[in-house]
Amino acid sequence: MISLPQDRSRGLPALAALAAGLGFIALQMIAMSIAGGVFEYPLDDVYIHLAMAESIAAGEYGINPSEPASAASSILYPFLLAPLSGSEVQRFLPLVINFAAILAVGWFWGMALVEAGLRGGAGILFALLGPVALNVPGVGFTGMEHSLHTATALALVIGLWRFLNGGPVGWLLIAGAVLGPLLRLEG
């Protein structure tokens, strides 16, 4: 027989990640239905990142060959898109990365709820509604680096919270502080 832990708040990260993931899938399905089964990103900026990634894979940095330029809003994101450059699969890489990122955002949101001491019905309610109310699926839907940046910001907040409450300088604090500005210059 499987026994559940007395403190069910430990399941809040998974519940919040599930809410974010299902919201993201629902948005993608609705958009594809409206577009007649065709997948496209709602912003042209994603295609700029993909073009930057192709340039990086070719050993250059910019949109036009032999014209170095920083056309992206992120230092790191085009590099994350570069490995599959030149293939049709690359076009879907922002979708996959953003799905993983919104799951991470949901997970970190749930961790923040646990750290804040939310329990019972209030914890479950905030875990389910928080990602949707904060438009986490919509941010991921854009295909941009914003979901990754949100995940690093939440990691930073949780890591800082733990440190200020007597914990060590943990990996969440370090990862959030290092990756945040690499994903968004404003980070």
Image (cartoon, rainbow, N blue to C red):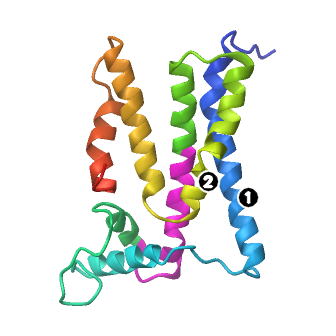
Q: Pick whichever, 60 or 143, lies toward us.
A: 143
Q: Secondary structure at mark 1?
A: helix
Magenta stretch in the rendered image: 84-103
Based on the picture, tell me whether residue 114 belongs to the magenta stretch: no
Residue at 42 percent of width and 28 percent of height: 158
Q: Which amino acid is tagged 2? A: Pro
Tell me residue 88's x, y (percent).
Answer: 52, 81
Mark sitting on residue 121: none
Q: Position of residue 136 (x, y in %)?
A: 58, 49
Tell me the crowding category of disc 2: few under 14, some 14 to 19, or many 20 or more residues within 10 angstroms, Cα based. Answer: many
Q: Is residue 64 above or below residue 56?
A: below
Provide the major secondary structure of the magenta segment. Answer: helix
Residue visible at 55% across and 36% down in the picture: 107
Locate residue 132: give its quadrant.
top right
Q: Secondary structure at mark 2?
A: helix
Crowding at dot 1, Cα within 10 Å, few <14 / some 14-19 / many 20+, comes out as few
What residue would you read off at disc 2? 137
The answer to whether residue 187 is above or below residue 33 is: above
Residue at mark 1: 26
Q: Are marks 2 and 1 in contact (CB under 8 Å)?
A: yes
Is the residue 36 above or below the residue 83 in the image? below
102 or 125: nearer the viewer: 125
